[in-house]
Image (cartoon, grey):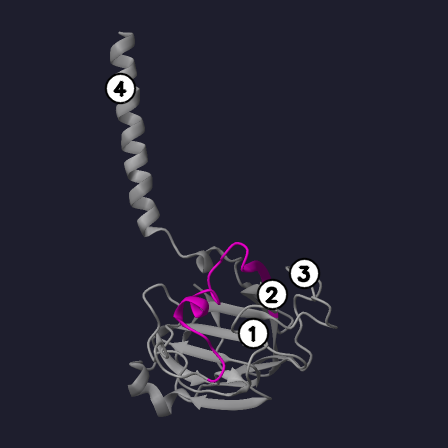
Amino acid sequence: MIRISFITALASLLISLSAAADDSEKAPSDYDEMCQCVDPFNGVRQIPVTIRDFQESHPDFEGNTGSEKGIVNSDLGLDGRPVYALEGEESITTSNTENFKQWYKNVPGVNVALNKKLEMVEIEPELWEYSDSSFFPIDNEGFGNQGNSHNYHFTLETHLKFFYVPGGSFSFKGDDDLWIFINGKLAIDLGGVHSVEEKVVYLDDIADELGIEPYNTYSFDLFFAERHLTESNFKFQTTFELQCL
């Protein structure tokens, strides 16, 4: 009886381990673990973001400066993150694929991940905005300010969805890198280490490129990086009401 019970227990354990392995393959990426959106209250919506702090010595931080389009592919990777497009090519502000992969993944010793929220305010009917001309959301956190007045070395990402209604738009104004993907396709490319740049996209104009049609729900993925002293600006506007995944 004891032997049978042991065999039964062992079989159950093996089944559990097998199921766990299957589940791990299907497990959501770490960005899906972020806190939930908070429903609008008094015209405010809280958007969850993951910010990763880096040390100033990282090869892609505090290097050369310059606006640089084309750092990432036009399609998101299978893991839901940007794919480095300049391997084997000369880049103004980046080093290589392996270092770029660290930007939006948790890498112990290389970055420190912090969950935060950005409050988007409905500044007028059906126009939502987050704006900060001194955008330093993780001062004295992670690796700290590293002797600077602010923490200037971090990346940010958020993964949301929205309902596409004709006439809608997204806009961003800031520095440094900013990539917005809609339906997995690159819609805004403000890559590089640069002063404030601005871009507005009207979805009706690029709907065919993005593979989207009105009155459907699509993914929205935003990736940002602050890589250089001495400014950090982040202004984002949209006519769409962004929702969590």
Range covered by the magenta-colored residues: 92-118
> Badge 1, how many Cα within 10 Å: few under 14, some, many 20+?
many
Amino acid beneath label 4: Thr
* Disc marking residue 127: none
Quadrant for the C terminus, please.
bottom left
Near-viewer residue (161 or 157): 157
Residue identifier under label 4: 8
Kindly indicate the quadrant of the structure image that contains residue 194: bottom right
The type of residue carrying mark 1 is Phe
Numbered circle sitting on residue 55: 2
Q: Is mark 4 in CB contact (under 8 Å) with mark 2?
A: no
Mark 3 residue crowding within 10 angstroms, few (<14) / some (14–19) / many (20+):
few
Give the amino acid at mark 3.
Answer: Glu
Image marks 2 and 1: residues in contact by CB distance under 8 Å: yes
The reply, left or right, for residue 91 in relation to residue 10 is right
Which is closer to the viewer, label 3 or label 2? Answer: 2
Cα separation, mark 3 vs mark 1, equals 17 Å
Question: What percent of the width, then of the height, locates residue 112?
Answer: 57, 58
Q: Residue at x 50, y 69 (%)?
A: 157
Secondary structure of residue under mark 1: loop
Q: Earlier in the sequence, mark 3 or mark 4?
A: 4
Q: CA distance from mark 3 to mark 2?
A: 12 Å
- Which residue matches tag 1? 61
Report if residue 117 lies within the magenta region: yes
- On residue 141, which mark appears? 3
Q: CA distance from mark 4 to mark 2?
A: 51 Å
Whole-Å distance between the Cαs marked 3 and 4? 50 Å
Give the label, 3 or 1, closer to the camera: 1
